[in-house]
Image (cartoon, rainbow, N blue to C red):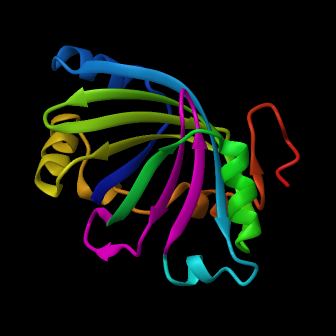
Amino acid sequence: MIETEIKIKVDDFKNIQKKLNSFGAKKISSVFEKNIVFDTEKKELKKKDCFLRVREDKKATLCFKGPREKTNTKKREEIEFEILDAKKAEQFLMRLGFDKKLRYEKNRESWDFKKTEIVLDELPFGKFIEIEGNEKDINAAAKILGYNKKEFITKTYFELAEEAGIKKDIIFGDDTNG
């Protein structure tokens, strides 16, 4: 599957939640996520603009994301599937030669809006809106909600964490930051 999305950094979610409600969006879920990003010691996946992650929320998933295409959105191959045991998946990846490079947590609220999925992600280093769908629908939803292409972020949370000076862990209630 090809994933297409953008992020927008915001100060709070109250305004966007009001807009989503007023435009008839449907709230899908609220979850607390734990994510672990893996790479080799030499960061071979990062050098290829690829991404490998184990995620835990109400379920556990393993995800690989391929290199990004050069567009105004973040567009890339995504292979994601449910796994039974996140800890065993982590052990499996480590036995294959991958290391844990970043652990991050976030609160995520998901909405269904105009052929897109809108998620409100709160991480210890900021609040972000993600809009996922096809490029045309992403642009239309962003415009309706009052955002323009200049505000679009196509970086990963891993890259945004690095820019924020966080090296290893982004955990709520933990100021050690690895």
Tell me: 19 left or right of 35.
left
Tell me: 109 left or right of 37.
left
| Residue at the image point whose x is 38% and y is 28% from the top | 110
- 89 or 108: nearer the eye? 89
Image vertical order of residue 4 relative to residue 20, above or below: below
Magenta stretch: residue 134 in it? Answer: no
Image vertical order of residue 69 relative to residue 76, above or below: below
Residue 19: x, y in percent?
25, 22
| Residue at the image point whose x is 15% and y is 36% from the top | 144
Residue 148: x, y in percent?
24, 51
Image quarter (top left, top right, bottom left or bottom right) of the C terminus: bottom right
Image vertical order of residue 48 relative to residue 178, above or below: below
- Quadrant for residue 119, please give it: top left
Q: What stretch is highlighted in magenta?
A: 50-75
Image quarter (top left, top right, bottom left or bottom right) of the N terminus: bottom left
Residue 75: x, y in percent?
30, 65
- 13 or 52: nearer the eye? 52
**Please, which residue is most extreme toward the right here?**
176
- Quadrant for residue 106, please give it: top right
| Residue at the image point whose x is 17% and y is 53% from the top | 134
| Residue at the image point whose x is 39% and y is 47% from the top | 8
Image label count: 0
Majority secondary structure in the magenta region: strand
Magenta stretch: residue 59 in it? Answer: yes
Residue 130: x, y in percent?
37, 44
- Quadrant for residue 162, please give it: bottom right
